[in-house]
Amino acid sequence: MERIIFHIDVNNAFLSWTAVYLLKQGYKEDIRKIPSVIGGDEKERRGIVLAKSPVAKKYGIVTAEPIYQAKKKCPNLQIFEANREFYIEMSHLFKNYLKNYSPNIEEFSIDECFIDMTGTNYLYKDYVKLAHKIKDEIKEKFGFTVNVGIGNNKLCAKMASDFEKPDKVHTLYKDEIVTKLWPLDVSELFMVGKKTTQELYNMNIHTIEELAHTPLGKLEKKFKKQAEYLRKASWGIDDSEVNEENYHKNNSISTTETLKYDTVDTDKLKEYLLRQTERVTRELREKGKYANTVSVIFKDNQFISYSAQEKLSNSTDDTREIYKKVVEIFDKNFKGISLRLIGVRLSELTEHKNKQISIFEIEEEKEDNSEIQKTIDDLNKKFGNDLIIPASLKIIGKNSLEK
DNA sequence: TCTGGGGTCCTAGGACCC
DNA sequence: TCTGGGGTCCTAGGACCC
């Protein structure tokens, strides 16, 4: 049976949601109708465009460009802060609402999801009509608009929802690949970014149709494993399932921060690292997982990024153990060039603590931190972030300085 | 006050073993 | 005695997504 997949995509999610929030607060203006953007705080050096209104777009403002640059393009641009908590609330709200239509929903990001509607046609005779119903109900209930893409697989549904915005329903069924997908530029294809686009252009491949007709062997020379994806995608082929678990795979947990000032001060940097370690390990414990690999992420004042990772001898969720490793990695790899950003990542997450006792070492008696850890987590949860950090942890960073 | 933050997946190359 | 080659594990970095 042919599958029917919907892809639902909130139009200008952050901006729309902030507009909804402001209207709720009694704000007079709908910021979707004026030149406006959601942007990070410039004083905190997070000044980039996260979302833009259609009017702002007309001024040539693009996502991820610096705010100061956007202001140059449009001097009366209005800038609003991101409101993450409210976004998460809205995200839950509309995804829960979608469960009325099918139990098989896969979150794809904060503002996108796939719904597998296969086999529901005895309930909903006309999918396009149904999509309109869903779209209009969301608008009415929650005050923001979405695009709905319909296809026989996830890729086509996703491509379809991107066709024309906002507040639209589009289909990209199998028999529409030639007319709707092939005329598009290769850069429009999902997973074809800047780099791949340029390489395809260099091969004189510009449209998806041209890509579809390029011999696989020729693509493989350039793109290796990616070639197969490109070939399949250009023909609108995608066998992946809609699976709610996909979004919660949790292969890694990370946090990075752009520092308020560039610095080489290792004490200061380790303070950041400690708070970040505290944050990611808390998340790890909340998810009931254990980490096997620890990474430290650096970006220097020249915008050069580098990272270093090391495996732990045993998987753990213990802040102290992980922070020890973080400091070790930092000390070995920090190049001494003033840093703009620093971060911590935990990866190779497992469900179970695998305690492998080496035959060469006698397992030292470790005090069990887990009860204390849990109490600290609860307090931090109650009173906000990063309040309580045990003093003993700070010592780990200091000790390593004296070596 | 110039360039965010959180993810996934893939690849190349080195170390090490047989 | 003149350096093969397969396999595995690990790491750094890049491309891409929202």
Image: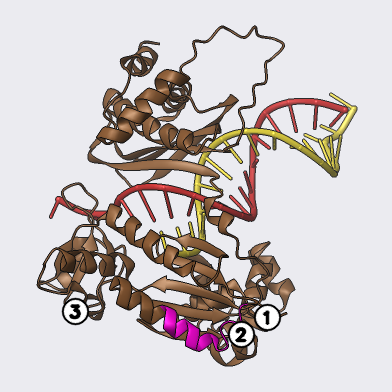
Chain colours: A brown, B red, C yellow
Q: Label 2 marks which chain's residue?
A: A
Q: Label 1 marks which chain's residue?
A: A
- The image quadrant that residue A350 belongs to is top right
Evaluate whether label 2 is on the same chain as label 1.
yes
Please state, as top left, top right, bottom left or bottom right, where the C terminus of chain A lies in the image: top left
Residue at (26, 78) in percent of width and height: A54
Residue at (33, 62) in percent of width and height: A90
Identify residue type, mark 2. Answer: Glu
Q: Position of residue B9 (x, y in %)?
A: 61, 54
**Vertical relation: A292 (above or below) A19:** above
Mark 1 vs 3, N-terminal side: 3
Residue nearest the viewer, comparing A108 with A97: A97
**Vertical relation: A46 (above or below) A235:** above
Q: Position of residue A154 (x, y in %)?
A: 58, 72
Residues marked 2 and 1 touching at CB (< 8 Å): yes
Mark 2 secondary-structure assignment? helix
User: What residue does disc 1 label?
Assistant: A214
Q: Residue furthest bottom?
A: A179
Identify residue type, mark 3. Answer: Lys
Instruction: Compute the Cα span from label 2 to label 1.
Output: 6 Å
Residue nearest the viewer, comparing A146 with A155: A146
Q: In front of the other: label 1 or label 3?
A: 3
Q: Which mark is residue A210?
A: 2
> Does residue A267 show up magenta in the picture?
no
Q: Which residues are magenta?
A: A120-134
> Does residue A126 show up magenta in the picture?
yes
Mark 3 vs 2, N-terminal side: 3
Q: Position of residue A50 (x, y in %)?
A: 29, 62
Residue A201 showing in the rendered view: no
**Vertical relation: A256 (above or below) A223:** above
On the rendered structure, is A78 left or right of A365?
Answer: left
Q: Which mark is residue A33?
A: 3
